[in-house]
Amino acid sequence: MNSAATPTFVDISSHLAWFKSYAAEKTAQEKGDTSPMNLKLRHSLNVLENARRIVEGEKFDTATARLCLLAALYHDVGRFEQYLRYHTFRDRESCNHGQMGVRILKAQGCLKHESREDRKLVMAAVGMHNRFALPTSTPPLVALITNVVRDADKLDILRIMDEHLGGPAPYNPTVVLQQPDDPTIASEAVLRAVFEHRVAAYAALRCVNDFRLLLGTWFFDLHFATCRRKFLQDGYADNLLRSMPDSVPQAAARDYLLTLLDAAKKDAQIPACR
């Protein structure tokens, strides 16, 4: 899917205009706090830009790049309806937001000017981007597009969590998926995932500090060199991990993750955060 003639710009402006209009319409329907929906709009636009960096950095051909950008833009289109109906972003307590997104794309017809095959590819990526792991039977092109979205998504969620947990205001339960900020508890499953070099599962979370560790484990599941380098350069995972006090039961796992990240930075010739 690579080409020496990598596009520096793929125009999806009509889709971007539709998405912003849809988000504004749904946000206007919310009678309570609209900040979670505003957060999702900003997040979607940032994921789109992260995806653009990936397709350019990895030198994707124009057709593949366009599919990746469309899937990135629409990956969380289901979040707005989800929040309107359930006032949570926890799929287990509401609905599968990826599948909700597919239903919305079909009902709204916003992909109608794309080819039938391209519509299928974009909707497949939207529908599967939030799975813990892609099925081994996933067609290669679907997997490629979906993994661009998954990597781009992770990068911006790290930004959101660093800004949210590092700010002066108390954490918003919606942003941290209703996890308690209790420094005395820890998930053994999350701790094991760290030491086994695999991604921790949302279902294993027991508290906010578990969430910090889970975000650090995402480095084990990045698919593109462009994304791995940005993960290290941004420093959001470092900030989230280093803000945990030494007294928490996650301290040893935190230190282990930081050692791994510092080693990766050294290999990539990126200055370590201190």
Image (cartoon, helix red, strand yellow):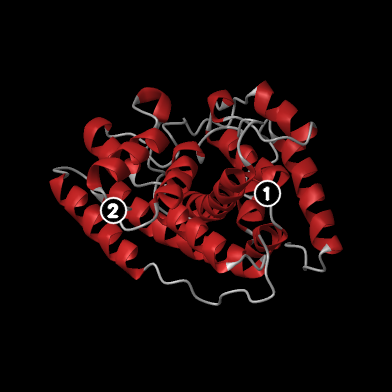
Q: Specify the amino acid type for callout 2.
A: Cys
Secondary structure state at the residue bearing disc 1:
loop
Dot 1 and dot 2 residues touching (CB under 8 Å)? no
Give the residue drawn at x 53%, y 33%.
131
Give the number of marks: 2
For marks 1 and 2, the one nearer the N-term is: 2
Give the residue drawn at x 60%, y 56%.
236
> Residue 27: x percent and y percent?
21, 50
Tell me the quarter of the image containing the C terminus.
bottom right
Q: Please tell me whether residue 189 is drawn above or below residue 107 in the rendered image.
A: above
Q: Nearer the viewer, mark 1 or mark 2?
A: 2
Query: What's the distance in space between the residues labelled 1 and 2, CA to CA?
Result: 29 Å
Tell me the quarter of the image containing the N terminus.
bottom right
Q: Specify the amino acid type for callout 1.
A: Leu
Q: Residue furthest front?
A: 116
Of the pair 122 and 193, the residue shown nearer to us: 122
- Residue labelled with disc 2: 110
> Residue 130: x percent and y percent?
50, 37
Of the pair 20 and 166, the residue shown nearer to us: 20
Relative side of 206 to 219, left or right: left
Q: Residues within 10 Å of mark 1 (few under 14, many from 20)?
A: many
Q: Please tell me whether residue 161 is drawn above or below residue 91 in the rendered image.
A: below
Disc number for residue 94: none
Give the residue drawn at x 68%, y 22%.
188
> Residue 108: x percent and y percent?
23, 47
Relative side of 134 to 34, left or right: right
Disc number for residue 222: 1
